[in-house]
């Protein structure tokens, strides 16, 4: 009889549950959309109860629809999102403070003298994007008596009765010693946090945890942060292979092998995964606004839907100089300017709504190209091909432009479920099994550069200059 794995991808805009059988065939997919609340002060929040309910509902429905025996569960989490909760009852005592939330920017600025040491320990730049500043921010707002952790630890408590976090997710916190892969008392002290209150660390894959949350008792054999799950799913298993996921933001990860590589060019260094047989590290760069920038175009009436991107930009003039730095939620790697706002340049009386849409698409592609270039400098070798996944990869215009400005081939993952497939494969390995569907092709579409190298350099130089000005303007305001 067929058996399978239940994979949960708990993301920002939605929760996805997928059942994959041991032959690599997806038997069911259930997706539940989630709400997001943005506040005028830079706050971005979600309802923890809605998040938990979506995990349970999606998982149970996926199991019912698949109608096969499931032998394990794997869960990918959205990373860097935090909340306060009652350690005895599991009741949420705050909203889920999203990874996009910038309200801890003042706290981060006040700790600026510690930034070099924090980065030396954790591999991460000191920025509100990561977990620790938001934990401190919650503590300072009346949650001293509550347990304050990453969202994943709270979800895991509800799934298996233990507030655990996997080492890859912990490496996104500013609190993990990257060299030893253990919590750092020194880093915790910098943020005024008690290392003893941090969640227990577990491997990416393990048979030690189990859950009854979806019905039968099942091993909870894989826990991992979503972007690392996608890195695994897109088979970036070898040093020098990289992927970018285009979701709410665009997140680029490069496999650095079994040795931590601290960035000299503004990227963050993390644990990719730790299994019983394999440890990998990665460099990553964050474009905070990708899908959310497209959502802004829709809300302002410049675009009817994300599916309309290719039609709208098809007639944009080659000579258009409209430029956008899509820093709607600040600038991530490699500039790290949390107070930066979106920057539009090169507009004149001939600029059309189509030009504006194109400038946002161009801005996303150029910012991804910037983080790829930084990673190539850090690793000392060029990226041969960029593997990509996520909702925006359905735009041929964006993917072709990405290949153009990057001057590298872009390969779109064969499935829209890279993160869930990655965590399913890890959960299967967590049982001590071999790989799922080891001979499957992962490439759906491939885009080759069409733009000349000179054109690409000119386009990127224009965008880089605009990004520099956006960062400078943010520093002047602060």
Image (spheres, rainbow, N blue to C red):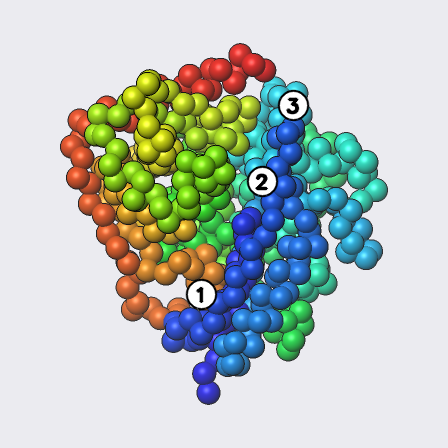
Q: Is residue 256 visible from the viewing direction of this image?
A: no
* Residue at the extreme bottom: 1
- The residue depicted at 24 percent of the width and 36 percent of the height is 315
- Measured from the top left, where is residue 285 in percent x and y? 43, 37
Task: Give the crowd class for mark 1: few <14, some 14-19, many >=20 residues within 10 Å.
Answer: many
Q: Quadrant of residue 117?
A: top right
Q: Can you identify the residue that label 1 sits on?
A: 425
Task: Give the crowd class for mark 2: few <14, some 14-19, many >=20 residues within 10 Å.
Answer: many
Along the line of sight, the residue nearer the viewer: 171 or 77 = 77
- Measured from the top left, where is residue 371 in percent x and y? 38, 34
Tell me: 366 left or right of 300: left
Distance from disc 1 to disc 2, alpha carbons, whole Å, reads 26 Å
Q: Secondary structure at mark 3?
A: helix
Tell me: 444 left or right of 163: left
- The residue depicted at 81 percent of the width and 57 percent of the height is 89
Q: Can you identify the residue that label 3 sits on?
A: 106
The quarter of the picture where the C terminus appears is: top right
Query: Are discs 3 and 2 less than 8 Å apart at CB?
Result: no
Q: Can you identify the residue that label 2 sits on?
A: 99
Q: Is residue 417 visible from the viewing direction of this image?
A: yes
Distance from disc 3 to disc 2, alpha carbons, whole Å, reads 16 Å
Whichever of labels 3 and 2 marks the residue nearer the N terminus, that label is 2
Distance from disc 1 to disc 3, alpha carbons, whole Å, reads 41 Å
Whichever of labels 1 and 2 marks the residue nearer the N terminus, that label is 2
Q: How many marks?
A: 3
Mark 1 against mark 3, which lies toward the viewer?
A: 3
Q: Secondary structure at mark 1?
A: helix
């Amino acid at each position: 009889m067929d058996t399978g794995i239940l994979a949960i991808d708990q993301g920002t805009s939605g929760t996805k549950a997928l059942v994959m059988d041991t032959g690599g065939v997806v038997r069911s997919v259930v997706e539940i959309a989630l709400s997001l609340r943005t506040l005028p002060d830079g706050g971005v929040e979600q309802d923890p109860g809605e998040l938990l309910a979506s995990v349970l509902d999606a998982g149970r429905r996926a199991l019912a629809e698949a109608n096969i025996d499931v032998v394990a569960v794997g869960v990918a989490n959205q990373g860097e999102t935090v909340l306060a909760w009652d350690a005895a009852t599991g009741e949420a005592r705050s909203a889920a403070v999203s990874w996009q939330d910038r309200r801890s920017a003042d706290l981060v600025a006040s700790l600026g003298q510690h930034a070099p040491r924090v980065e030396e320990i954790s591999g991460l730049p000191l920025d509100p994007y990561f977990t620790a500043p938001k934990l401190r921010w919650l503590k300072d707002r009346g949650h001293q008596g509550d347990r304050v952790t990453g969202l994943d630890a709270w979800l895991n408590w509800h799934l298996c009765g233990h507030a655990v976090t996997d080492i890859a997710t912990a490496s996104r916190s500013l609190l993990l010693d990257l060299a030893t892969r253990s919590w750092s008392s020194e880093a915790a002290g910098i943020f005024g946090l008690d290392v003893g209150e941090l969640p227990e660390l577990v491997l990416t894959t393990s048979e030690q945890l189990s859950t009854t949350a979806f019905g039968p008792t099942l091993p909870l054999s894989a826990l991992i942060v979503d972007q690392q799950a996608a890195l695994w799913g897109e088979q970036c298993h070898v040093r020098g292979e990289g992927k970018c996921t285009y979701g709410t933001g665009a997140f680029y990860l490069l496999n650095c092998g079994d040795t931590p590589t601290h960035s000299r060019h503004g990227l963050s260094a993390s644990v990719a995964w730790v299994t019983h047989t394999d440890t990998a590290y990665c460099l990553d760069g964050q474009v905070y606004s990708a899908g959310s920038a497209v959502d802004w175009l829709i809300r302002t009436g410049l675009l009817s839907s994300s599916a309309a991107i290719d039609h709208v930009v098809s007639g944009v003039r080659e000579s258009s100089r409209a430029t956008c730095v899509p820093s709607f939620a600040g600038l991530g790697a490699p500039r790290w300017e949390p107070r930066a706002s979106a920057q539009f340049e090169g507009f004149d009386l001939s600029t059309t709504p189509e030009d504006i849409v194109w400038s946002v698409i161009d801005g996303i592609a150029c910012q991804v190209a910037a983080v790829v270039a930084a990673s190539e400098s850090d690793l000392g070798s060029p990226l041969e091909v960029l593997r990509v996944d996520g909702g925006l990869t359905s735009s041929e215009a964006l993917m072709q432009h990405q290949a153009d400005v990057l001057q590298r081939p872009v390969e779109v993952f064969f499935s829209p479920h890279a993160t869930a497939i990655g965590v399913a494969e890890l959960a299967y390995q967590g049982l001590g099994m071999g790989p799922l569907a080891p001979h499957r092709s992962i490439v759906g579409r491939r885009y080759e550069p069409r733009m000349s190298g000179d054109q690409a350099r000119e386009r990127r130089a224009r965008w880089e200059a605009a990004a520099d000005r956006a960062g400078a303007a943010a520093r002047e305001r602060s």
